[in-house]
Image (tube, rainbow, N blue to C red):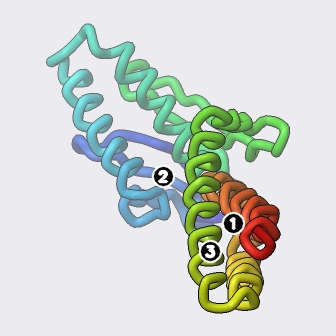
Amino acid sequence: MTEGRPVELRVRNERPVLVGTDGTGNREVDPDTLPLGGELAGALREWAKVAAAVDRGDADAAADLVSRRGAQLAARVADALGRPVEYADPVTGEVVVVEPSPPPTAAERPAEPTPWSTGLTVAGFVLVVTVIAVVSLASTLHETNPLLALVSNVVISAGLLPSIWLARRVAVWRWVAAGVAGGIVLSWLALPFILFG
């Protein structure tokens, strides 16, 4: 099939076919051989069987549904192939050209809402756990040597800083990173009380 020319979506012998001009004449192509994805190819096969049943007169009430579903599938095929598709309605015989939809721009994509309540809960929990862990370690090491308490805070802060920096833009992990960062800051504020208290 040549690029830019529309392909035609038809039903033949209870199976969907795409007919395209390849320069030497019309050639039928099985949708399973195209990069449409398994779900879309399966939907096309299902639609073709129903359309063939309607065409035989087995289900007159479903004719409108078959026409609409075929048009929807033609639009999906056009989007998947990135080129126009001529949809031959198996019920009415009408041929309609379906253009692929333009890719969405950044402004058209819906923004995800920020989960403030869940995120702050996670950040608060991680903050408490971090403070307890770092302050407990510093207190324990202070009993051996006060300098070890300071060294432990430096090592923990330096070790966690790269992970916090990388996780700050990841959707779920940014809340954990915020909690760890806050916990480290609070543990540094608690360190003078451990050393001189």
121 horizontally vs 53: left or right: right
Residue depicted at 84% across the width and 38% down the height = 107
Identify the image quadrant of residue 67. top left
Residue farthest along the front direction in this orientation: 197
In the rendered view, tell whether residue 151 sits above or below residue 58.
below
Identify the image quadrant of residue 159. bottom right
x%, y% of residue 46? 27, 39
Q: CA distance from mark 3 to mark 1?
A: 29 Å
Q: CA distance from mark 1 to mark 2?
A: 49 Å
In the rendered view, tell whether residue 3 sits above or below residue 91.
below
Q: Which residue is mark 3?
A: 139
x%, y% of residue 44? 36, 43
Residue depicted at 66% across the width and 52% down the height = 175
At label 3, the amino acid type is: Ser
Which dot, 3 or 1, sits closer to the camera? 3
Find numbered disc 2 in the image and state the secondary structure of the residue it sits on: strand
Q: CA distance from mark 2 to mark 3?
A: 77 Å
Residue depicted at 70% across the width and 40% down the height = 101
Residue farthest along the top direction in this orientation: 61
Q: Earlier in the sequence, mark 1 or mark 2?
A: 2
Are dots 2 and 3 in contact, CB under 8 Å?
Answer: no
Q: Which residue is mark 1?
A: 167
Are dots 1 and 2 in contact, CB under 8 Å?
Answer: no
At label 1, the amino acid type is: Ala
Q: Which residue is mark 2?
A: 19
| Rendered image: mark on residue 98 | none
Residue farthest along the left direction in this orientation: 58
Q: Nearer the viewer, residue 32 or 60?
A: 32
Assign the N terminus to one quadrant of the image. Answer: bottom right
